[in-house]
Structure formats: C-alpha cells, structure tokens
Image (tube, rainbow, N blue to C red):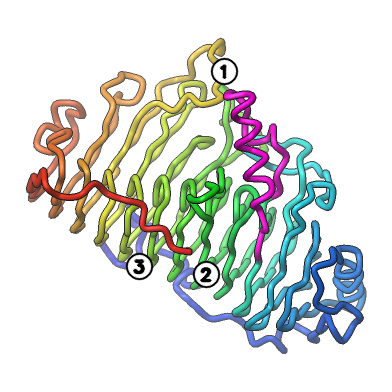
C-alpha cells in the first residue's frame, strides 16, 4: 500500500501530512491576558477572559496569549479568527463547578441536545488554532468523585446523569489545528470534534488517571461525523478510549442529517499508555471508512482495535488498517456486541458489518490476541486480514488460524503466536 494512501487507495490530503503551524504573528495581533487586565489567580475569571476574546473578534481577529501562571475559567467561546496560545508554564484550568459552564444546544453521545458547553468551544471557526507548550487542565476530580458516588446509588446512571463538561469542543469547522499542548484531567470527554474536516491534532499529551479516583469517560479524542483528520505524535493515556470514532446512534441513525460518517482518518507515531482501547469504532457510529493507524507503540492498553457492534444502530466499519504497532496490549482485536444504554425494546437494526479490516506487521505481547464474537448480527459479511504478526500471548484465546471458520472470507497469514503462561498479565502502565 502506498504510504500516503488510505486503505482503499484514496490519497491522503497533503495538509494532513504537515506538522506546520502558522507563526503566531501570522494569525493576527497577540493579546496577552495580563496586559489586558486578567492576572493569574485561583479565582474563576470567565467573564473577564471572554471579554478579551470578544474584543479581539471585534478588532478583526488575533491570538489570545495566556502567559505563565494559572488562570481559572468556565466555558469560553472562540469565534472565527480568534486563536488561543498557551506559553510554557501557562495553565488554563477549568472550574470544578458545573454552574460555570453554559447550557447550550450541542452534540453529545451521538445526539444533538441541550447539554453543557466545554471549557474551550469553537463553532464555525475555520482555521481555529489552539497551540503552545502550556496546559489545559480540566480540574475534574470533584465531578469524578460525584459520578462514582451517583453510580453507587444508581448503578444504571448514564454519563449525562452526573453533569460534566468536556475540555474542548470544536464543531462545524475546517483546517483546525491543536498543537503541542498538554490536555489533562477533563471532567468528561477531553477533545471532541464534530463535523470538522481537515483537522490536525499534533504532538499533544492527553491524560487522565485510573487511580486513586478513576476519571470516568475521559476519552482522549472523539471524532464525531468528521472527515480528513490527522492525529500524529501524541501521547494518549486515559481512563476510557484513547481515540473513539462516532457519528450517531439509533435504528434510523443513518437517516438523521445531524449524523454522519467518519472517514479518512490518519493516526501515526503516537504512544498509547493505558486506555480501554487505542482505537474504537463506536459506541455511537454508523459508518467508519478509510481509517489508517500506523507506526505506534502501546504500553498496557486493553484493546488495540475495538469494534463496538451496537444492536440498535446500523453500522458499517470498512477499510480499517492497523499496522506496524509494537508493545503490550491485552487484545489486538476485540469485536463484541455493545448494548450499554441501548434501548432493549427497540426493534433490532439491520445487521452490522466489519469489512476489510486489516492488522499487519505488529509485534506485541498480549493476554490473548483475538476477542471475537460468533453472533450472527456481527459476523455477516465481515472480512479480516491478519498478516505478519508476531505475538507473545499469555493465554491461547481464539486461535488466529481458525479465523476463517468464524469469518469465511477472512485470512490469517504469517501469524506467529507463542504461548507463554508465565508472561505477566497486561497491566495498566498509566502515564501521569
């Protein structure tokens, strides 16, 4: 396969292969917070920071520059032409109080509905650039503790039952760049892009803890109905999925104009620490196509590639290639029905399919490499290729040479599995 093509042969857009960002002064005048009346403090300063953003917009655009120090805020809204730079040592910290986050019509968990805005919000903001060597800190501990307490009281509570803001939400925008930042400790999803195209997330460090208080549903990156996105050189270690591809849910999700496919996604040269999965399709997905993940290393994730097959949603996952991966991961490939919070009384959706899914040229230690279902709703028409895999497995699990028994049009070739029962279980190697 041409290294600059997606799995079906479609060329990768040249802008996705570039690491460049415009020089700060090319984005417009620089407005330093402290020079405009906002000083570092643990006091929440949402209104004062938003005032400067609005003044920059009124003046024709530019860059909000956050200097060294800690600045606390609730929801901030960036219009087109206004960018955000965080200097080394700068910390933009989210308020721990949900009342500091605006209630807006937004997109969350595969539906458009009223919910709380993120800390950083940009809508119809083509060219939005969020960069520097500083930190955006969600400050999410208070809401994590509240979530787990609520879950003890009501084991069926959903993510939205304990109101929690995301860290970054960018929607309906093109040529977005997030570069070189540390994004940590989000209340909820960390970086959520909806209906964005030609976007790049480059050389960022995105983390949340698994202990002593696990950070629930703090996905590092959620791509929702997005196209032409590059994720490169990032370090991702979170208490949920590292990269999740989303696009809608429900039996007629493919007919809803708010939903859409996720396609032409390039993930490369990333390091994955602990996560539930390095790359997940679902749980709110309808069509994922032309996904290429390559040249990455993994330290203790649960799954390398996870395909969530939701019974109440028509799904097609196709032309997905994961190649040249090394490290330790409990399972290389996990495909099972996913029914959490699905409507048990809804009529079943048409059968979902995983087609032309390839894992090749990987060298990994596993608990067991394949965790696959035999349910007909997931199997029909599915095709996998496993090629040139060197696997050291603690348990036998599902033997790759029997892949074609479950998926008749699938193929495993040059797959070497060495069973070592003394190999330690794959542990969380959390990056803090």
The vertical placement of 330 against 42, above or below, is above
Q: Secondary structure at mark 1?
A: loop
Residue pointed to by mark 3: 4
Disc 3 vs disc 1: which is toward the camera? 1
Where residue 215 appears, x then y in whole percent?
A: 56, 48
Mark 2 touching mark 3, by CB under 8 A?
A: no
Does label 2 or label 1 sit earlier along the sequence?
2
Q: Secondary structure at mark 3?
A: loop
Along the line of sight, which residue is nearer the eye, 414 or 14? 414
Which stretch appears magenta? 137-165
Badges 3 and 1: C-beta atoms under 8 Å apart? no
Tag 2, which secondary structure?
loop
Which residue is identified by label 1?
343
For the residue pair 429 and 20, the one nearer the viewer reads as: 429
Q: CA distance from mark 2 to mark 3?
A: 22 Å
Disc 1 residue crowd, few under 14, some 14–19, many 20+, Cα 10 Å: few
Q: CA distance from mark 3 to mark 1?
A: 41 Å
Give above or below for 134 relative to 309.
below
Q: Earlier in the sequence, mark 3 or mark 1?
A: 3
Residue 290 visible in the current orientation:
no
Q: What residue is pinned by disc 2?
A: 204
């Amino acid at each position: 396969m041409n290294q600059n093509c997606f799995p079906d042969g479609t060329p990768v857009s040249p802008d996705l292969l570039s690491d460049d960002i415009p020089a700060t002064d090319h984005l417009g005048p620089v407005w330093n917070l402290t020079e405009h009346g906002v000083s570092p403090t643990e006091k929440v300063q949402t209104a004062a920071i938003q005032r400067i953003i609005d003044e920059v917009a009124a003046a024709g655009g530019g860059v909000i520059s956050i200097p060294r120090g800690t600045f606390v805020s609730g929801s901030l809204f960036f219009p087109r032409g206004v960018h955000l730079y965080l200097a080394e040592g700068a910390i933009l910290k989210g308020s721990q109080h949900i009342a500091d986050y605006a209630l807006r019509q937004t997109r969350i968990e595969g539906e458009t509905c009223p919910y709380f805005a993120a800390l950083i919000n940009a809508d119809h903001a083509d060219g939005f650039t969020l960069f520097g060597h500083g930190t955006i800190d969600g400050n999410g501990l208070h809401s994590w503790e509240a979530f787990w307490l609520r879950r003890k009281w009501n084991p069926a509570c959903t993510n939205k039952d304990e109101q929690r803001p995301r860290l970054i939400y960018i929607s309906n925008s093109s040529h977005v760049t997030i570069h070189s930042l540390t994004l940590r400790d989000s209340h909820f999803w960390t970086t959520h892009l909806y209906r964005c195209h030609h976007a790049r997330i480059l050389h960022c460090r995105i983390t949340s803890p698994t202990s002593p208080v696990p950070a629930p549903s703090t996905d590092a990156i959620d791509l929702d109905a997005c196209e032409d996105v590059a994720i490169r050189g990032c370090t991702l270690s979170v208490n949920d999925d590292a990269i999740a591809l989303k696009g809608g849910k429900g039996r007629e999700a493919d007919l809803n104009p708010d939903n859409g496919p996720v396609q032409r996604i390039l993930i490369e040269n990333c390091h994955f620490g602990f996560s539930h999965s390095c790359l997940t399709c679902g749980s709110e997905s309808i069509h994922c196509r032309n996904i290429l993940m390559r040249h990455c290393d993994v330290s203790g994730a649960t799954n390398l590639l996870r395909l969530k097959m939701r019974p109440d949603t028509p799904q097609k996952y196709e032309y997905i290639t994961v190649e040249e991966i090394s490290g330790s991961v409990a399972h290389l490939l996990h495909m099972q029905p996913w029914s959490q919070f699905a409507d048990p009384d809804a009529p079943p959706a048409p059968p979902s399919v995983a087609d032309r899914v390839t894992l090749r040229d990987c060298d990994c230690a596993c608990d067991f490499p394949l965790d696959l279902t035999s349910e007909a709703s997931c199997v029909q028409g599915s095709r996998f290729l496993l090629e040139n895999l060197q696997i050291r497995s603690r348990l036998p699990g599902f033997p790759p040479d029997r892949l074609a028994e479950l998926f008749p049009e699938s193929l495993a070739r040059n797959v070497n599995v060495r069973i070592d029962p003394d190999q330690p279980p794959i542990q969380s190697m959390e990056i803090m």
